[in-house]
Amino acid sequence: MTPETLPSWPDAAATLIAVAAGRAPAQTVVRGGKVVNVHTREVLTWEVAIAEGRFAYVGPDASHCIGPETEVIYAAGRYVIPGLCDAHMHVESGMLTPAEFCAAVIPHGTTAMFTDPHEIANVLGLPGVRLMHDEARMQPCSMFVQMPSCAPSAPGLETTGSEITPDDVAEAMSWPGIVGLGEMMNFPGVVNGDAKMLAEMAATARAGKTIGGHYASPDLGPAFHAYAAGGPADDHEGTCEDDAVARMRQGMASMMRLGSAWYDVESQITAITERGLDSRRAILCTDDCMAGTLVNDGHMNRVLRHAIACGCDPLVALQMCTINTATHFGLERELGSIAPGRRADLILTSDLTELPIERVIALGRTVAIGGKMTVPCPHLDWPNSARDTVNMARDLTAGDFDIAGPDGANEVTARVIGVVENQAPTRALTRTLPVRDGRVEATGDTCQIALVERHRATGGVTNALVSGFGYTGRMAMASTVAHDSHHMIVVGTCRENMALAANRLRAVGGGVTLFSDDTERAMVELPIAGLMSDSPAVDVAARADALMQAMRDAGCTLNNAYMQHSLLALVVIPDLRISDLGLVDVTKFELTDLIET
C-alpha cells in the first residue's frame, strides 16, 4: 500500500463498517496490547482491527473481526502508539532521495512526514519539486509535500538556479500529494506586503491548505504581528520560551525542532512544562537531519525521547508529534491517531519513555521489525537533467579566492560571519586582519569563505570571512549544498586547497569534499541536483561520518558543524551571510561591505 493506492475514507467506508460490525474479516488484528489514545490521553487495554490500509475497529475486543485469513499480531503487553509525524523537514538535508530517506526513518517509527523541497526548487524549479512529489507518492508511508514558497528566499540578495512563481504555487496546489505552502522565509516581504508573497499565500488559502511559516527574527513587536496577520500558520524558528509563547498566542503552531544541529526543544518546551500553556498548538519536528543522525540516533523517536527527557509528560509529547501535527494540517480525520477510518499507522513499543521501536505498521501493513525494513521503498528514475547541475564556467585557481586590501593598507577592519554552535543564526563580528602583498589574510580563528556560482556558469566568486570553525593548518571544505541558493560554499585556511576542493566538486557533479595539505581527506558525492545521493542511507552516513572526522582532524570541534557550513548562504536568518551578490546584513536585509571604511 502506498499513498497512491490507498483508498479514500469514503471509498473504504463500506468495508470498514462491515469489519467493525463483524460482518467481514479484518486483514490484520493487533491483540494483547495497551493502546495509547492521543485524543483523550489515555492508555487503554484495547485491540485494533485493520482493513483497506485503515483502522476499522479500535476497542476492547476485536475477536469478532478475525477471520480465517486475518493476520493476528500479539502485542504481548506492549504499547500500541500512533505512527510518528514530522511536521517540518527537508529530505535533501539528509543527503538522500525521498525513497532512501523513508527507508532510513520508517524503522524509527516515522510514518508521516511533511517535507518542503525548497532545496531542489532553488536548483531545478517546479520540475524538481514534481520529481520529489512523485517519488514521495511511491513510498510505503505518508510523505506529504509542501510547495516551496521562496526561491529565491530573498529576492535581490541572491541569485538561484530557478525561481518559484505564484503561478507555480497555484499549479502545485492541484497535485495529490501537496498539503500546503512551504515555509514563508521572506518574512520582510510578508511584513511589507510584497505582492508575490501575498499571491502565493492567497493561492494556498484558496486551495484550503496550510501556509508554512519561518519568522527568523527576535523582534516580537509589530513586525511579528504583521507576519502573523499575513497567514503563516506555524513557525519553527523559535529559540526560546518567549518565542513559543508568542506564536501560540497568535494562533500559530510553535514547531519545536531537534535536528542534527538545531537544539531548540529544551529552550521552548518550558512553555508547556513550566508555564502550563495548552499544548495543542505545540508540535515537534526535526527540520534538518543528516544521514548519520538518522542511521545512528533516530528521527522523530529521537525528538520524542528528548522532549520527555526535558520534562514533558510522555503522552503530551506523543500528542505533539502525532495528533497535534495531523490537526494542524487539516488531516485529523486521516492520520495522527489510532481511531476508526484513519490511516493504519502504528508502532509497538515496550516503553513509553525510551521508545524502542519493535514493529512499525504503515498504511495497514508491517513495514519494519526490529529496526529493519520489511518492504522496499521504490525509486524514481531520476533524469539526467537532475544529475547534471554543477555548471561552473571553468576550474578555479588560488587567485580566485584573493581578498584585495585597500591600497597602501597594512591592516583592515573586516566584517566576519560568526558561527553559533547548535543554532542556525550567526553573529556579525569584526576582526582586525593584516594585509600582505595587497591581500587580506585570515588569521587566528578567522577563515576565508567563498560562494562559487554554479548554476549559470558566470564564473563568479564572492569572497568573505568566517569565524568559529576552529580550523588549523592548510585546509578547505567545499559543498554544493548551500542553503538556499545552493551555489557552492568553500571555507578554508588555504586558497590553493580552496581551489582544489571547488574543482573536485565540479568534476564529480556535486557533493561535499574536504582537502588538507593538498590531499582529499573525505568526499560525499551528491549527484542529484548537487544535493542528494540515491545510495542507501547507511552508505551515505558512513561517508558523512568520514567527513565529520576529517573536519575534526582539521581542528573543528563544533557539534555537527557541517550544518553550520551549509547554512552560511541562507540570507533570511540573521545576522550575517554570504551570497553570490556579496555579504548580506540580514538584520537590515541589505548588502554590506566586507571591509569597514
Image (cartoon, rainbow, N blue to C red):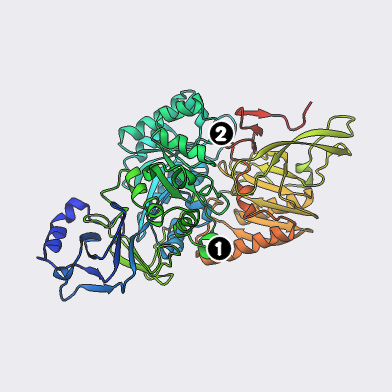
Identified at 59% across, 66% down, the residue is 542
Quarter of the rendering containing residue 57: bottom left
Disc 1 element: helix
The x and y percentages for residue 564 are: 63, 48
Can you say which quadrant of the picture contains the C terminus? Answer: top right
Q: Looking at the image, which is closer to me, 509 or 197?
A: 197
Q: Amino acid at mark 2?
A: Pro
The x and y percentages for residue 388 are: 55, 51
Please indicate, yes or no, whether residue 118 appears anywhere in the rendered image: yes
The x and y percentages for residue 174 are: 31, 41
Residue position marked by numbered label 1 in the rendering: 540
Residue 218's mark? 2
Q: Is residue 547 left or right of residue 233?
A: right
- Give the distance between the C-alpha atoms of the residues marked 2 and 1, in whole angstroms: 36 Å
Q: Is residue 274 left or right of residue 418?
A: left
Identified at 83% across, 33% down, the residue is 412
Q: Residues within 10 Å of mark 1 (few under 14, many from 20)?
A: many
Q: Amino acid at mark 1?
A: Val
